[in-house]
Amino acid sequence: MKLIDYGVREDERKYIEEWAEDNNIEVKIVSDLLTPKTVELANGFDGIVAYQQLPYESSIFDKMNEYGIHVLSLRNVGVDNVPFEALKKNNIRLTNVPSYSPEAIAEYSVTGLMALLRNMKHMIRKVDKHDFKWAPDIGRELNQLTVGVAGTGRIGQAAIKIYEGFGAKVIAFDKYRNEELDKKGMYVDTLDELLKESDVVTLHLPSLGIGNTVINSSTISEMKDNAIVVNTGRGDLVNTADLFEGVASGKLYGAVLDVYENEVGVFNENLMDQDLGDKLLENMIKSPRIIVTPHIAFYTTKAVKNMATISLNSMVEELKSGKSATEIDLNK
Ligand SMILES: NC(=O)c1ccc[n+]([C@@H]2O[C@H](COP(=O)([O-])OP(=O)(O)OC[C@H]3O[C@@H](n4cnc5c(N)ncnc54)[C@H](O)[C@@H]3O)[C@@H](O)[C@H]2O)c1
């Protein structure tokens, strides 16, 4: 069996090499993304593994079919950049990595929140300039706050455990309730209720589709004064311009955003000294009360190793048995 792994970052390489050695399977590592041109490198291989945020172009799959390759295994969870029709036309199966470390994302969202509650961004900037004054950066304590968790799937549940450990009051909303959390009486009945009652709203939902934002000017006006929004879910859950206005006007205390609706082409790029061409992003970066990070909540050694190895294991399962536990239903 010969596999080819595309879009491999340096930090992923060693996990792929270790896996190849442990499993005695040849894996060619390519740093280029999978494109209609680079797919030519896959001729002669049995399966393609990849990860990229840019769209996978349909003609890639015509070539895969031509080369007799019928499985694409992704190292990530999201499949919205894959054209299912082109896969179906070429009889190609797709796998993803649905869960690589919910704790990584949960821990990160709490880290961001704690940093904001203690005004870390502003304090670090002040200390950089040798301003060691305390005021006005007085902190707030998590154990005094009500945290509203929107989405109690894998990541939301991991986050709840941490928030409970800090002694915060936790309330939650999900369209499908988790039995144990329900027994604890943690759920409110509507998202509106969650937004109205929370000092911190933390989003652990998938994208709800274009224009379906959870945080926007109308919902912000219903939220508590001085509330905080934490988003490690998906950028399009938030109307970012409205959120910025909510913070700038003083209605909201601040926000932690690890995802952003216009992040593709910016996050995980080094654009040092370049004009971003995005005033909103630049204003958020300047704001002492908005912490922006480039989609790094998942970025831990454990998660990166799991993404690299689970995708390869799925590929082997597919090639040996024609199916795998992480195969995506292309008809959904
Ligand atoms: N920032 C990062 O690095 C990073 C990494 C991984 C995942 N994520 C994002 O985190 C989010 C959550 O991931 P997860 O693994 O916990 O997913 P999950 O599928 O386990 O949980 C999502 C939860 O949302 C609920 N839900 C879906 N639609 C809803 C709606 N309309 N109203 C109420 N509840 C709804 C589901 O019932 C489910 O319980 C995803 O958006 C994912 O893309 C971010």
Image: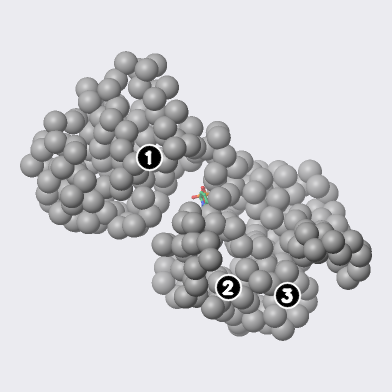
Horizontal and vertical percent position of residue 212 = 47, 73
Give the label on residue 8, or none. 1
For the residue marked with disc 3, what is the amino acid? Leu
Q: Which mark sits nearer the N-terminus, 1 or 3?
A: 1
Horizontal and vertical percent position of residue 184 = 73, 48
Residue named by callout 3? 252
Q: Which mark sits nearer the N-terminus, 1 or 2?
A: 1
- Residue neighbourhood size for the residue with mark 3, other residues' Cα within 10 Å, grouped as few (<14), some (14–19), many (≥20): many
- In front of the other: 37 or 114: 37
| Residue shown at the point (56%, 50%) measured from the top left | 296
Circle 1 SS class: loop
Drawn side of residue 78 relative to residue 179, left or right: left
Q: Are marks 1 and 3 in contact (CB under 8 Å)?
A: no
Give me the C-alpha separation between circle 2 and circle 3: 19 Å
Give the label on residue 270, or none. none
Front position among marks 1 and 3:
1
Q: Is residue 123 visible?
A: no
Q: Is mark 1 within 8 Å of ligand 1?
A: no
For the residue marked with disc 2, what is the amino acid? Glu
Horizontal and vertical percent position of residue 280 = 55, 76
- In front of the other: 25 or 93: 25
Compared with 330, 319 (above or below) is above
The N terminus - image quarter = top left
- Residue neighbourhood size for the residue with mark 1, other residues' Cα within 10 Å, grouped as few (<14), some (14–19), many (≥20): many
| Residue shown at the point (19%, 44%) measured from the top left | 39
Residue named by callout 2? 282
The C terminus - image quarter = bottom left
Compared with 89, 277 (above or below) is below
Drawn side of residue 124 relative to residue 108, left or right: right
Q: Is residue 277 visible?
A: yes
Circle 3 SS class: strand
Horizontal and vertical percent position of residue 277 = 47, 75
